[in-house]
Amino acid sequence: MQTAEQSAEQLIHDRGQRVTPVRTAVLGVLLQASGALAHTDVLERLQAVGEFDRVTVYRVLDWLVAQGLVHKVLGAGRASRFQATDAETAHQHGHFQCRACGKVYCLSAVKLPLPLALPANFKAEAVELNIKGVCADCAELRVA
């Protein structure tokens, strides 16, 4: 079984792009994450691997989005969060943001159809649905 970093390296290589330690490390962190992560969360998790420059990590996250390996979700305060994208499907699913803890979850089971009619020469590439509420963990804390 491959590690997250090995999977990341293979995904980058399969795109025909240059594999670098920082690209591999950042994508590896996102592949292991159970939800979308903010830049600061990615930096925090990278500390286990080594020291990385925050600006370089920003650039790598943007590069991963441009490559279609990661998608960006706007969270609270319009802060971006990032999650590895399933290579087999376009980014067309819902997201849930917890108002209590701020975590953003991809709802892969919530599929969105592309618009049926767009103006001439328009091409839809992604559809987003953002649901805001309280996640199960925070709901339990409120009950207790």
Image: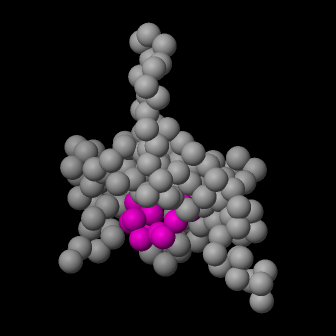
In what quadrant of the picture does the C terminus appear?
bottom right
- 129 in relation to 125, above or below: below
Vertical placement of 120 versus 24: above or below?
above
Residue 117 position, x and y percent, is 45, 20
**Residue 57 in view:** no
Most foreground residue, 88 or 2: 88
Give residue 12's position: percent from left, percent from top: 29, 52
Residue ranking furthest to the bottom: 144
Q: Quadrant of residue 17?
A: top left
Q: Residue at x 39, y 65 (%)?
A: 31
- Would residue 29 be counted in the magenta stretch? yes
- Please say which color scheme the image uses: one colour
State the image quarter where residue 49 is shown: bottom left
- Horizontal and vertical percent for residue 41? 59, 66
Left or right of residue 113: residue 94: right
Is residue 21 found left or right of 129 in the rendered image?
Answer: left
Q: Residue at x 48, y 13 (%)?
A: 119
> In front here: 110 or 73?
110
Q: Is residue 31 left or right of residue 40?
A: left
Question: Closer to the camera, 101 or 136?
Answer: 136
Front residue of 45 and 79 = 79
Q: Is residue 55 above or below residue 51?
A: above
**Image quadrant containing the N terminus:** bottom left
The answer to whether residue 100 is seen in the rendering is yes
